[in-house]
Amino acid sequence: MSTTRPVFYVSDGTGITAETIGHSLLTQFTDTRFVTDRIPFVDSPERAREVAERIRRVGEIHGVRPIVVSSCVDPTMTLLIAASGALMLDVFAPFIEPMERELEQQRQSRVGQAHGLVDFETYHRRINAMNFALTHDDGMAINYDEADLILVAVSRAGKTPTCVYLALHHGVRAANYPLTEEDLEHDRLPARLRAHRAKLFGLTIDPVRLQQIRQERRPNSRYALLETCKREVTAAEALFRAERLPVLSTTHTSIEEIASKVLTTLGIHREMF
């Protein structure tokens, strides 16, 4: 029988690291329903005590021991939060001691290093990549000379969020091109894409899922008809096959997985920020 367990992602920074690792961990336990909450910037004893009390109260409400996935680098904060009675999972703990032994030095528990503006060149590359993605969204700008890659797909197949993710997390200049009905009447690439075929990656999606997404955007329109979605997806997939483009279905694939597959397939090597 399924149970509900409260989970808190707690950090002295943004909490993104704790949430990312914690989410991956929770997906391994399918018989439990988790309710999650991210609590960032726990960077003072007062704040830590407030958070501990909040976690304790939630545990009482649910009648179970909460779980805390923590990326706090200050052990003092961790001890204060542990007073909540929660199961404490420190994302750094398994790695610190082996690293200290290997490097023959003690760690320096400084808050904010993971997401700080340590490298301004890297930071500006991310910003520039984001600006590029936004100005080259849905074919608004068609000068692809500076693009690292171009995602090609029918409307609402996941092009824009993937481009934004690639820019924000990898500093990749990702453009996207929406295949129109006119484009899909032919079995070859639109003229503006042919000179950039080495940068192209196709995305497809199950027509039923596409219909659901389009129905939310434009209810009861021709654009959202299942017949329209089936026709467009079939034509797009035929185009991808004819042009021998790499292609991935986004139906059951996360943005992180899509981005990783695209980068690997196109041979683009960028570390994650």
Image (cartoon, rainbow, N blue to C red):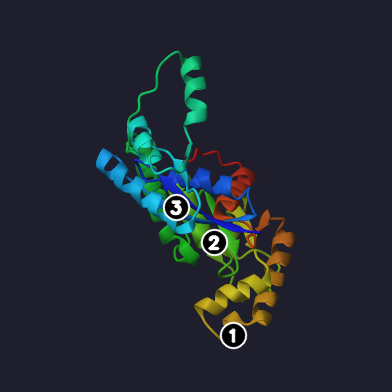
Is residue 125 positioned above or below 154 on the image? above
Q: Which residue is mark 1?
A: 222
Q: Identify the element where label 3 is drawn.
A: helix
Q: Which residue is mark 2?
A: 159
Q: Residue at coordinates 64% horizontally, 60% vertically from top-left?
A: 252
Q: Which sits earlier in the primary sequence, circle 2 or circle 3?
A: 3
In x, y percent, where is residue 140?
45, 66
Q: Which residue is mark 3?
A: 59
Q: Amino acid at mark 3?
A: Gly
- Horizontal side of 206 relative to 102 (left or right) equals right
In x, y percent, where is residue 168?
43, 49
Image quarter for residue 1? bottom right
Q: Which sits earlier in the primary sequence, circle 3 or circle 1?
A: 3
User: Distance of mark 2 from mark 1, alpha carbons?
Assistant: 21 Å
- Which is more foreground, mark 2 or mark 3? 3
- Horizontal side of 186 relative to 199 (left or right) equals right
Q: Which sits earlier in the primary sequence, circle 2 or circle 1?
A: 2
Q: Amino acid at mark 1?
A: Arg
In x, y percent, where is residue 265?
64, 46
- Horizontal side of 54 relative to 187 (left or right) equals left
Is residue 148 positioned above or below 206 on the image? above
> Which residue is nearer to you in this view: 22 or 172?
22
Mark 3 is surrounded, within 10 Å at the Cα level, by few (under 14), some (14 to 19) or many (20 or more) other residues, namely many
